[in-house]
Amino acid sequence: AGYGNFYNQTYTWMIEDTVKDAFNMVGIKFHAKNYAMGGTPSGPEISLCMETTFGNDIDILSWDYANSDGDNYDLYRLWGNRAGIHPTIPTLFRLGKDPTCSSIDDDFQRFGLSAIQFDVDYIRSLVPDTSWETVDDLPPEVRYYKCAGQVEGGSVLCKENKWDTEGTTCDLSEYQTKEENRGWKDHKLIGRVIGVFLVDTLLSALADLEETLLEVSTIRNISVSQDKDRYAFQSSSLKEMHEGANLGKNTKFLGGHAKYSPFWRSSSFCHSALLPNHARFTGAVTLSMRSYRHDHGYFVGYDEGYAVDALPETKPKDGQFLLAYLPEMRQNCSDVYRADYKDFFSGEETRRMGEGRFAKSFGNEAISDNGG
């Protein structure tokens, strides 16, 4: 989520900033969307609700959940399996180096799902130390980035230059005092490296096309190849893909090879209040055609719904849920530094204990336009 930085300093923003002009030159609009949710694991909610959360039109799906998932590797297996049945079967980009996750990537790729690992610690190791001998030669982006071999540490100078939010009215001390939150230089480094990789991949694809006679049959062959990958993945079983994994041993949700397999591979219908959330932005959650602008992580209209301390006294019609949020969690300054909020649905049961059923109507133009 880039806590402690502004949204235009996060590595997601930097990826788009690096590649957008190159992709635009060949008629491709490149959008990198920061849908990260701080302190949230990759599953089960996010994994099971990929279409709702990220939308139906994604080519690359980033996994950066090492801190929140820990050694619950079934979470990563679930993530990949849900990506494999996504309408676009996106390529997985995984940040971090983990031998078990790399082995799981091999499982995915044997059955047609692309997965790429970015060893961010290795990338960081390539940046030279800042010393009295090098300080004047290093550009601002890496000056005081690494001191005495420690990234964003090792000396007072590196710690003091970790953030670049001077002049803001926002109180970011809550985030900037946590060592695990990365500063703007780290985000820029990672974003630039991933962006250069994408541009290099684009150039390689163009070189291949230049050497290929572009005919209808060529395009058909590419389409057939993609269909084969899709079929190989979706026709495989969990048992043969993750042979010997003993699914559910490390994580007590959705485990097993047969009993719970529908949750791993079947289409889901999710209605999530979390932000950021594609369905929230398009108006599908609130059953309205009112949509909100989400540009580079800037969410306009996030105060939609009811503050939990100001819920209406009257019960919702037909026992429906109310969209609610915690007002103390909302940012209170003009500089956008976060857009992830754990909003929720509130019903009568959340205010008093008792009997009751809740209902929610589905189906409007907003949902239909977004794959619902």
Image (cartoon, rainbow, N blue to C red):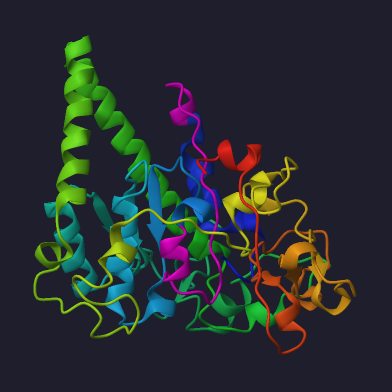
Most common secondary structure along the magenta stretch: loop
* 169 magenta-colored: no
Q: Image point 32% across, 75% down: which residue?
A: 254
Bounds of the magenta segment: 22-49
Rendered view: 14 above or below 119: above
Q: Residue furthest bottom?
A: 353
Residue 122 showing in the rendered view: no
Q: Position of residue 215 (x, y in %)?
A: 21, 9
- Is 112 above or below relative to 156? above
Q: Is 27 drawn above or below residue 141 in the view shown?
A: above
Q: Is residue 232 left or right of residue 60?
A: left
Q: Is residue 70 left or right of residue 40?
A: left
From the top left corner, tell me how far across and down residue 90 is, in percent: 34, 46
Q: Nearer the viewer, residue 173 or 116?
A: 116
Give residue 212's quadrant in the image. Answer: top left
Would you say 233 lies left or right of 347 here? left
Q: In x, y percent, where is residue 145? A: 49, 69
Residue at 9%, 76% (x, y): give it. Answer: 244
Nearest the viewer among 65 and 88 is: 88
x and y percentages locating residue 79 in the rendered image? 34, 63
Q: Residue at x 28, y 75 (%)?
A: 74
Q: Quadrant of the N terminus?
A: bottom right
Left or right placement of residue 316 versus residue 159 in this view = right
- Magenta highlight on residue 46: yes
